[in-house]
Amino acid sequence: MKFRKKPVVIEATQWMKEGDHPFVMMCWFDALGKVRWAPGDSEAINIYGCIKKPAIATLEGWHAVTPGDYIITGIKGEHYPCKPDIFAATYDPVEENE
């Protein structure tokens, strides 16, 4: 069975650096790429050997963000990152009056 994605207008911002989007925050990732510490977590967590990287809280948990990623605001107000090539293949610009 095949399905067509419903046309939905979304808001998106291309993220390049810290401060470009209010929901992208610095988190500590372990060697497996899992968030070890994120804003709002207890300060008592050991982050030894972890790497500090930008991330965004999504419905599925924290996801790393890299420069050039688009931060999409979904239809229910949720946020998630999207790689530039996927974004370009999936979305077209919309006139401001649409």
Image: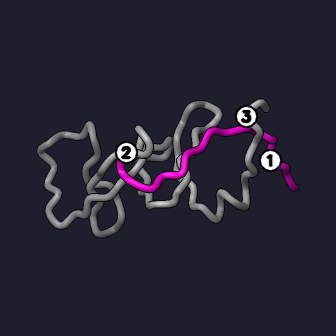
Main SS of the magenta segment? Answer: loop
Question: The residue under label 2 is which amino acid type?
Answer: Gly
Amino acid type at circle 3 is: Glu
In this picture, residue 47 sits left or right of residue 59: left
Circle 3 SS class: loop
Is tag 1's residue or tag 3's residue first in the polypeptide sequence?
1
Q: Which residues are magenta?
A: 1-18
Label 2 vs 3, first from the N-terminus: 2
Q: What secondary structure is found at the residue carrying circle 1?
A: loop
Q: Nearer the viewer, residue 65 or 33?
A: 65
Q: Residue at x 17, y 57 (%)?
A: 47
Q: Nearer the viewer, residue 29 or 19?
A: 19
Residue 57 position, x and y percent, is 42, 43
What residue do we see at 25% from left, 50% from top?
Answer: 37
> Mark 1 touching mark 3, by CB under 8 A?
no
Residue under label 3, please give it: 96
Task: Residue under label 2, please give it.
Answer: 19
Q: Using the image, determine if residue 41 lies above or below residue 27.
A: above
